[in-house]
Image (spheres, helix red, strand yellow):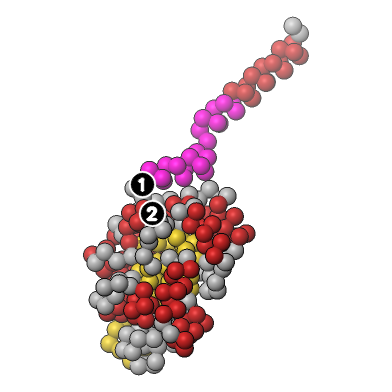
Amino acid sequence: MNRRHFNTIAIIGFLLLCFSFSCKNETKPEKEVIATKEAKTKSALIDAFQYTSKSQPIISVHRGGKDIKNYPENCLETLVYVNDSIKAIYEIDIARTKDNVLVLMHDNTLNRTTVGGEGRIENLSYDEIKSLHLLDDFGNETDYTIPLFKDVLTWAKTNDVVLTIDIKRSVAYKDVINLIREVKAEDHAILITYNLQQAELAYSLAPELLLSVSARNEKELDWLLHSGIPTQNMLAFTGTKFSSNSFYEKIHSYGIKTILGTLGNLDKQAEARGDGLYKRWADKGIDIIATDRPFAVAKATQTK
């Protein structure tokens, strides 16, 4: 063997040794990282919200309660008031203050829902907004103030209430998830996502939680079924218009419950033509009715 061949073999050997060492020390692949997170105890809601043909319709109270005189939307006192009257779950909206405090608020600004509040909530500190009084949806001033998300989580856990959590664009999913874990409210929290990217992100961060996912048509459902997110982690939001019976049946065949947003046109239709429509819609294959008229839906669908 001449010196040139010996040097070539030595260089190849050195490169192979370096490659072997770097492989042993590289970070875990994404799948392994996710698998490690799956070791967390899954939310009890994952089993509780699996579809069965004997499931009773569930009321989801939009914004924690809208159009209730003297009770503002996204307000802890409103949640308590509604929860004392009917059996329901509660959709709430999470916003972030300038100093990264998570609170309940639907709008980007304070103008519509508070007395004297102005400007974007993300540009103001919690101390600047915590004393503002909330308005109800009719413009009446109340004694209630903007609630901390942490306080609402604690209330939900204490009272065995389920929250579906709408996360505003200024808020990071990880911050919401960290607070849910801090309060140990995993069994009381469902994360709302609006597209496949958000659903995959939420699942990667918290595979133990139940997700509301957007499945308004066959294409969106197919994306979800091939996403790697287990169907047991899904509730299928099918939009604010009706789909075909066969589409609901297909979703049910995977053990997934359906959510219909009646808020808006369908609520107005029921108000004009009779609340019995809610029962007919539930019989059509709707498992969760997201509504601005929770008391009317309860009267029409819930047996005493």
Residue at x 46%, y 45% (from the top left corner): 34
Q: Quadrant of the C terminus?
A: bottom left
- Residue 143 image offset from top left, x and y in percent: 27, 87
- Residue 269 image offset from top left, x and y in percent: 49, 84
Badge 1 density bin: few <14, some 14–19, many ≥20, Cα 10 Å? few
**At numbered mark 2, what does the secondary structure look like: helix, strand or loop?**
helix
Magenta segment, prevailing SS (helix, strand or loop) = helix
Q: Is 29 in front, or is 6? A: 29
Give the quadrant of residue 51. bottom left
Regarding residue 244, the answer to whether it shows in the image is yes
| First-in-chain label (2 vs 1) | 1
- Residue 228 image offset from top left, x and y in percent: 53, 48
The reply to whether dot 2 and dot 1 touch (C-beta < 8 Å) is: no
* Disc ID at residue 203: none
The magenta region covers 18-39
Q: Determine whether, in the image, residue 255 is placed left or right of residue 158.
A: right
Q: Is residue 28 above or below residue 82?
A: above
Regarding residue 210, the answer to whether it shows in the image is no
Badge 2 density bin: few <14, some 14–19, many ≥20, Cα 10 Å? some
Residue at x 71%, y 12% (from the top left corner): 6
What separation in Å lies between label 2 and label 1 (alpha carbons)? 13 Å
Q: Which residue is mark 2?
A: 46
Q: Which residue is mark 1?
A: 40
Instruction: Answer whether residue 143 is magenta in the image.
Output: no
Q: Amino acid at mark 2?
A: Ile
Q: Nearer the viewer, mark 2 or mark 1?
A: 2
Give the quadrant of residue 159. bottom left
Q: Amino acid at mark 1?
A: Lys
